[in-house]
Image (cartoon, rainbow, N blue to C red):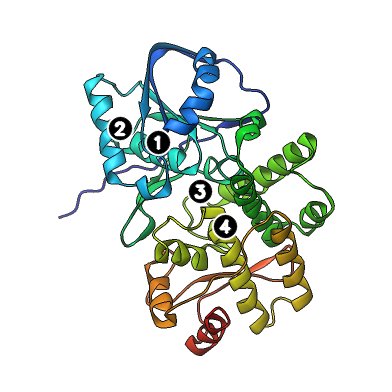
Amino acid sequence: MRVHIELKKEIDNSYQIDIGELAQIDLRDRKVAIITNPKVGGLWLSKVIPKIESRELYIITIRDGEEFKNIESVNYILENLFLHKFDRKSILIGLGGGVIGDITGWTASIYQRGIDFIQIPTTLLSQVDASVGGKTGINNRFGKNLIGAFHQPKHVYIDTNFLTTLPNREFGAGVAELVKMAVIFDFQFFKWLTQHDISSNSEYLKYAIKRSIELKAHVVSKDEKEAGIRASLNYGHTFGHVIENETNYSTYLHGEAVAIGMVMANRLAIRLGLLEEREAEEIEGLLKRYDLPTRYRISNIENFYSKFFLDKKSMDRKIKFVLPKGIGDFEFRDNIPENVIFSVLKEFQ
C-alpha cells in the first residue's frame, strides 16, 4: 500500500536589500525583538529604535564573539521570546555582524517552526556576505555552521554609516569577502578593487558593496540551498574553517581566516595548473593592502587534513575544493590526490 502526499508548490522568498541611510521600518502590527550584543547595542540602539514602528519592542542582548555563536545563545533568545509571548506573526531583527545575523536567522527559523526576521548588518563582512542569501546557523565543537537552516530574511537594510565605528581590522575582514567574490566571478571588479581604495571613499565603498551583493544574489537566485553553483561562494572557506576550528574561533576574525584560506587555495590551484603565480601574487597583494593575514603555521598536517572532512561540502570521503581558474572564474575539484594536498599544507608548516 502507498499514500502519496502532494506538496508541489511555488514559494516566493524574494526580498529587498536597501543600501543607504536606514529608513523607517513599519512593523506597527507586530511584536518585535532586536537581537544584538553589548558593543553594537551601546553604539547604535539609540539610533535604530526610533526607526522601528512596532506594537511592542524588546531588546535581547547576547554575548559578543564567534565563540558565543552556539546553542546556549539561541536558548537564551528563545527563553525571552517565550516569556514575552511571541507568536508566529512576531518578527526578529538582527542588529550586528555575521554572528548576530546567523543566530537571529536560525532562531527565527526554529521558533514555532519559523517566523520572519530582518537583517540590519553593522559590519562590512555581514553587509556583503552574511546578511545575504539566507544561510543561518551556529557552531559546535565539531566545526563552524554545522547546525543551521536556509531561512531567508524578509528585508535587509545596509547603511554604511554603521561602518564609521568599525575597527580597521573588522573592515579588512569584510574586504576579504569582496575579494573572494571578485576572484571567482568578476575579473573587471577585481581590477576595479586594485585601482580604488574603498576605505577612504564612501562612494567607492557603496559601489563595492552593491557589486558584491549583485554577484551573490545572482548565484543565490540560481541555487538557493547550495545544491550546485552556490558552493562556489566557499572559495577560501574550506581551509579557513579548519583554521578557525584549530584556533577555537578566537584568534582570527572570519574574514581573516578566509583571506588565509584563499592564499592556501591559490597554492593548490597553482599546483593543478589553474592559476598563475602572477595572479596569486595579485590576489595576495590586494589582501595585504587591507592588512589581512596571508600566512598560518600548521602545527600538525595530519590533524589539519582530517578536519577537512567535517566540512559540509565533503561527501563520501572526498574533499570538495573551490579553486580559482584564473581571476574571474572557478572550478570545483573533489578528486585531488592526497599527496598534492599535503604538499600544499607543507608550505604552511
The answer to whether 304 appears left or right of 122 in the picture is left
Q: Amino acid at mark 3?
A: Glu
In what element is the residue under mark 3?
A: loop
Upstream in sequence: badge 4 or badge 2:
2
Above or below for 232 versus 87: below
Task: Assess whether mark 4 and mark 3 are in contact (beta carbons under 8 angstroms).
Answer: no
**Mark 2 to mark 1 CA distance (whole Å):** 9 Å
Residue 305 appears at what percent x and percent y?
A: 43, 78
Q: Is residue 97 left or right of residue 267?
A: left
* Label 1 crowd (10 A; few <14 / some 14-19 / many >=20): many
Q: How many marks?
A: 4
The secondary element bearing badge 1 is classed as: helix
Which numbered dot is residue 104? 1
Where residue 74 sits in the image (x, y, percent)?
30, 39
Distance from disc 3 to disc 1, alpha carbons, whole Å, reads 19 Å
Q: Nearer the viewer, mark 4 or mark 1?
A: 4
Q: Return the disc, 3 or 1, that comes first in the chain's sequence.
A: 1
Residue that badge 2 annotates = 77
Instruction: Measuring from the top left, give residue 124's x and y in whole percent.
Output: 61, 42
The picture places residue 4, in percent across and down from the top left corner, at: 25, 48
Q: Which residue is mark 3?
A: 224
Under tag 4, what secondary structure? helix
